[in-house]
Image: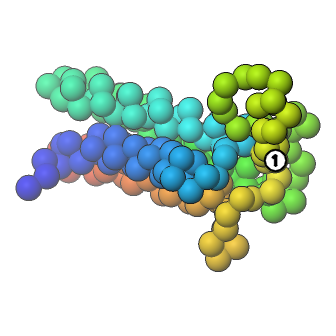
């Protein structure tokens, strides 16, 4: 049985790990090269993974665990907010950044530079039901952040 005290940090660890893992699978398994804003969405997930792992390691100190889990939830939400911005750029709701394009990673040579694909932030590489990967990241990230904060709140109110 899952310890209700650990539910929030476990979700705060698992959700960004799965989302970040999915991004890596889509990149390396299916060849969907990320644009600059795709990378921006990954950074908060990486931070959330570290924060939630620290929270789990410090589970003996309830105050530290809750603070780190809260920070992880906010990092997950930040990734979701970036996902909203990115999806809006893809759907043409607003303009993106003028420098938002990247080439595929790899060794840097003149040949590699000339043959690297240009990955635009305003064109989704993949959609399902009209929702892009950035849109799915926004949905799942904001949902996961809300779940973590709800679990933290429930723990506080049930202890009272």
Q: Position of residue 49 (x, y in %)?
A: 39, 34
Hey, which residue is sitting farthest bottom in the picture? 129
Local secondary structure at mark 1: strand
- State the count of labels: 1
Q: Label 1, on which residue?
A: 120
Would residue 97 be found to the left or right of residue 75 on screen? Answer: right
Say which quarter of the image contains residue 101: top right
Say which quarter of the image contains residue 16: top left
Taking depth in this image into account, of 76 and 39 the one nearest to the observer is 39
Taking depth in this image into account, of 153 and 52 the one nearest to the observer is 52
Q: Position of residue 69 (x, y in %)?
A: 35, 35
Would residue 28 be found to the left or right of residue 109 on screen? Answer: left
Q: How is the image coloured?
A: rainbow
The residue at the point 34 percent across, 41 percent down is 13
Work out whether 100 lies above or below 58.
below
Q: Position of residue 2 (x, y in %)?
A: 13, 52
Say which quarter of the image contains residue 68: top left
The residue at the point 29 percent across, 40 percent down is 9
């Amino acid at each position: 049985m899952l310890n209700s005290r650990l539910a929030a940090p476990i979700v705060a660890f698992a959700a960004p790990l799965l989302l970040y893992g999915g991004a890596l699978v889509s990149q390396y398994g299916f060849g969907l090269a990320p644009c600059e804003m795709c990378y921006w969405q990954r950074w908060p997930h990486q931070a959330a993974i570290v924060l939630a792992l620290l929270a789990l390691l410090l589970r003996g100190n309830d105050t530290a665990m809750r603070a780190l889990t809260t920070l992880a939830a906010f990092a997950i939400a930040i990734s979701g907010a970036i996902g909203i911005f990115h999806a809006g750029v893809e759907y043409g709701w607003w303009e993106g950044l003028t420098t938002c394009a990247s080439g595929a990673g790899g060794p840097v040579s003149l040949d590699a530079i000339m043959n690297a694909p240009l990955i635009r932030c305003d064109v989704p590489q993949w959609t399902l039901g009209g929702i892009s990967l950035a849109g799915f990241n926004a949905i799942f990230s904001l949902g996961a952040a809300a779940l973590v904060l709800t679990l933290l709140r429930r723990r506080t109110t049930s202890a009272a």
